[in-house]
Image (cartoon, helix red, strand yellow):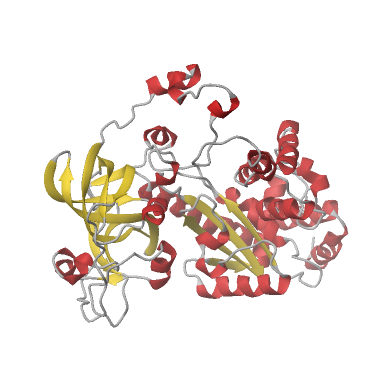
Amino acid sequence: MGDADLGELERQAGDGPEAYQAWLRELVRVRHERVIAAEEFGEELGAWVLRFRERLVEETRDWGVEVPALESRTLLPPIRAALKPLAQGFEDVGYGTRKLGRLYEGGRANWEEIDDFEQLSQPLVPLAFVSRLEGEVTIGLGTSMSRKATPGTTFPALSPWRASLQNETLEKRLKRWRDETTGLRSFPEEAVLLWVGLLDLESEAESEVRAEPRTERNLDYASEKQVKFVRSLWRKKGLSEEEFLLHVRTTTGLRSAAKLEFLGREEASELIEVLLALPDRKRAKKASRSPSNSEGGFDPSAWGEPAQSPASRPEAAKKAKKAKPGAGKVQWEGEVLAVQPRITMTILGGEEQHGYKGYTLYLRGKVAGAAREFSVGIGKAAQAKHEFQAGSLASGAGAPAPPGEGIDLYKASKLSQEAGDAVPVPSGPSPPYRGLPRELPAYRAQGHRSLAPTALDSGPCAECIHGCLMPVDEHGERTLSAECYGPQDCPAFEPGQR
């Protein structure tokens, strides 16, 4: 078949899935340069995804969790969504997103050791975001330490993220993300489009790229039970049809509630997770008319039944026997000397990837009854709740941290801030800067520079909210590096070497 015949097949490819597949098969048969470009894209994407997973493994190596398997096909759903037109008049614009997992430090078993849910470590949520603009498909892989991870909590250039943005605003937001975010990958739209079509050929499924989405696809469809559960959550959460469709579109790319049966099994599971995380409006209305205790929680005794502790119930008693509350943990208390961000860095292929774990409390007090100075790693939610700062009197429990973490204790629980004689240490116009530390996204936006170890160890930076003792993983080795997240003109800054 000559170039003229191949061109005729390409012109006919838009007539339907069968014609499109015939054109693809001929491209594959003659090993056309377009096929080679698409295969090169798939190989590059696969290698990049693999490096991203390796970073996740390094970042969570002491968490006791298993990082899910990731490959180039994992990004198919958001890529497919991005290849679809955003709306009429915005045919050259599209986006897609997908959460790739949810990792908790210590795994689910660790939850039973924590009394207050707010003190749980924030989950590490890997997320993929794909945009299509001006003939290019741009792919970003990042992590968010949020229980309600969104593209906005993962990439600052997309914050604040709402699926209900006007199309014009969304297009500007996508351009800003593409132009201002580092570590992204951009590819020609044609190569990506062809790669998706080739994968559909391999699985003997009809391509949805040129056809009506999801109506002619042979994928692992959601079960009838999953679809029914999605519809029941729609009702139970008290969502309007418009609100429900916003969540469906953002999570799966599907644009109609009438086509829920075309959801993939994994997509349905992700949508169920999103809906379950929403507040239950109907239940909240009923609860406002139900007896409750003085703290606002449910009190069974108000209904004429004696209140039971969870351990007094048979099911909970069995779990309590299996759990080891406080196993390996020690009690601590003391005066807070400084609060600094707890951030890690992994270097893979010359790229720096950061993990925003929370904050580090530096204290002078007692650990297991012994007087000493020590450090405790806490989560973002715990800091937001207790607002620790220099001068606070704090107490809690924690487990000894593994070597290389840069802290003495972690997995903090039973946190409290004592009233006592605590006197917050004021922050003056010159370093060290004290007071409440900034939120983690602010540190991320500021960026860091290498700091002289002596400045962080015993100099003014030791008590500054901008200092950070950062664990760095590179080539399988972990080191601790002194870093500064402070202003560029700080007079106390002493450059270091990393």
Q: Is residue 68 toward the left or the right of residue 3 in the image?
A: left
Q: Is residue 290 toward the left or the right of residue 210 in the image?
A: left
Residue 32 appears in view: no
> Picture coordinates of residue 448 (x, y %)?
33, 70
Quadrant where the C terminus sits is: bottom left
Q: Residue at x 24, y 79 (%)?
A: 430
Q: Residue at x 71, y 54 (%)?
A: 249
Q: Is residue 132 toward the left or the right of residue 122 in the image?
A: right
> Picture coordinates of residue 162 (x, y %)?
64, 62
Q: Residue at x 22, y 77 (%)?
A: 493
Q: Residue at x 48, y 23 (%)?
A: 308
In-front residue for pair 86/151: 151
In this rendering, the count of numbered labels is: 0
Image: 417 above or below 41:
above
> Picture coordinates of residue 438 (x, y %)?
38, 66
Image: 421 above or below 91:
above
Q: In the current view of this chain or complex, which residue is farthest to the top?
A: 314
Residue 316 appears in view: yes
Q: To which quarter of the image does residue 390 belong?
A: bottom left
Quadrant where the N terminus sits is: bottom right
